[in-house]
């Protein structure tokens, strides 16, 4: 089942009353199944060594998660959600596919990537699921990859945060986009099927297309700002209504 959920919000007004930063308009994913990612573009791993996606994949599918290594919002939750999904199915990073935390902020360093991996390991023992790679790169190389994927994100100067979508790109061994796993925590069965499809060079979609922004979170209070929190509550309510409607229809059809 694919559940399309549209989150929308008016652009904030600036001091002069002009339209301001609109995260829901600027952070999105343009669907580009079959798009080719530059697998040989150079990045640095958490040890500071130069590598690339082809070397990390080593002939296997790649799960690429766009993140901020120094994220005040939900990037850590996204990584943990994917790790939980991996633990719930038999395929493992390193042996069956490569798992890459792909830093989208060119200001971040390999040290930031290493710290992010350490937090993930402390949170749920990520080393038990297999190796996780964390990459940093230049503005040019990062956008070469995100642009090919149709992954749109933007910097809000007012609050010093990126707005970006929580999702995982699934790449074939040759670097083609097989599809996206959306949201914070994909279902283990969806993740398993995504890897199997990518290994067979299939273009596919798995699970629900729920676009959730990583943006506007207050790390001091541990809450989203009021405007974003209202939108997320609305999104949750719409999801519950959609699922309830589906169940009602299925029951009616089976009666």
Image (spheres, rainbow, N blue to C red):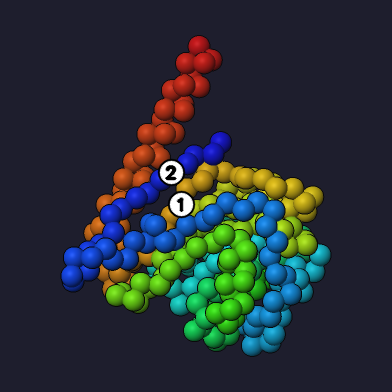
Q: Within the image, what quadrant is residue 157 found in?
A: bottom left
Return the x and y of residue 15 as percentages of the image width and height.
18, 71
CA separation in Å, label 2 and label 1: 7 Å
Q: Which mark is residue 5?
A: 2
Q: Residue at x 58, y 78 (%)?
A: 140
Q: Residue furthest left?
A: 16
In front of the other: 129 or 64: 64
Give the quarter of the figure containing the N terminus.
Answer: top right
Q: Is residue 16 left or right of residue 185?
A: left
Q: Position of residue 125 (x, y in %)?
A: 58, 68
First in residue order: circle 2 vs circle 1? 2
Residue at numbered disc 1: 211
User: Picture quarter containing residue 21?
Assistant: bottom left
Query: Seen in the image, is 166 located left or right of residue 206?
Result: left
Q: Residue at x 52, y 56 (%)?
A: 29
Dot 1, crowdedness within 10 Å: few (<14), some or many (≥20)? many
Residue 244 percent location from the top left of the image = 41, 30
The answer to which of 92 and 147 lies nearer the viewer is 147
> At 43% across and 43% down in the image, what residue appears?
5
**Near-viewer residue (55 or 38):** 38
Q: How many marks?
A: 2
Residue 226 in percent (x, y) is at 24, 59
**Number of residues whose C-alpha sits closer than 10 Å to that of mark 2, classed few (under 14), some (14–19) or many (20 or more):** some
Q: Secondary structure at mark 2?
A: loop
Q: Is residue 78 above or below residue 202?
A: below
Q: Is residue 166 visible?
A: yes
At a point 54% along the width and 61% down the height, the residue shown is 151
Contact between labelled residues 1 and 2, with CB atoms less than 8 Å apart: yes
Please tell me whether residue 50 is drawn above or below residue 129 in the rendered image.
below
Q: Is residue 140 left or right of residue 219?
A: right
């Amino acid at each position: 089942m694919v559940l399309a959920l549209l989150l929308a919000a008016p652009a904030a007004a600036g001091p002069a009353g002009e339209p301001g930063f609109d995260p829901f308009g600027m952070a999105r994913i343009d669907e580009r199944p079959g798009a080719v990612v530059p697998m040989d573009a150079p990045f640095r791993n958490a040890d500071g060594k130069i590598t690339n996606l082809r070397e990390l994949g080593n002939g296997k599918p790649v799960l690429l998660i766009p993140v901020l290594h120094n994220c005040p919002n939900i990037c850590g939750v996204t990584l943990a959600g994917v790790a939980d999904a991996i633990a719930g199915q038999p395929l493992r990073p390193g042996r069956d596919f490569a798992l890459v935390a792909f830093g989208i902020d060119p200001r971040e360093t390999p040290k930031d990537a290493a710290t992010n991996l350490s937090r993930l390991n402390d949170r749920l023992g990520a080393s038990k699921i297999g190796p996780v790679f964390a990459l940093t790169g230049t503005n040019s190389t990062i956008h070469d990859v995100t642009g090919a994927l149709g992954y749109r994100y933007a910097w809000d100067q007012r609050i010093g945060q990126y707005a970006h979508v929580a999702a995982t790109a699934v790449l074939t061994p040759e670097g083609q986009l097989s599809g996206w796993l959306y949201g914070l925590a994909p279902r283990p069965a969806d993740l398993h099927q995504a890897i199997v499809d990518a290994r067979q060079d299939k273009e596919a979609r798995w699970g629900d297309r729920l676009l959730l922004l990583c943006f506007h979170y207050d790390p001091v209070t541990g809450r989203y700002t009021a405007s974003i929190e209202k939108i997320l509550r609305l999104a949750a309510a719409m999801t519950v209504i959609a699922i309830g409607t589906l169940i009602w229809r299925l029951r009616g059809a089976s009666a």
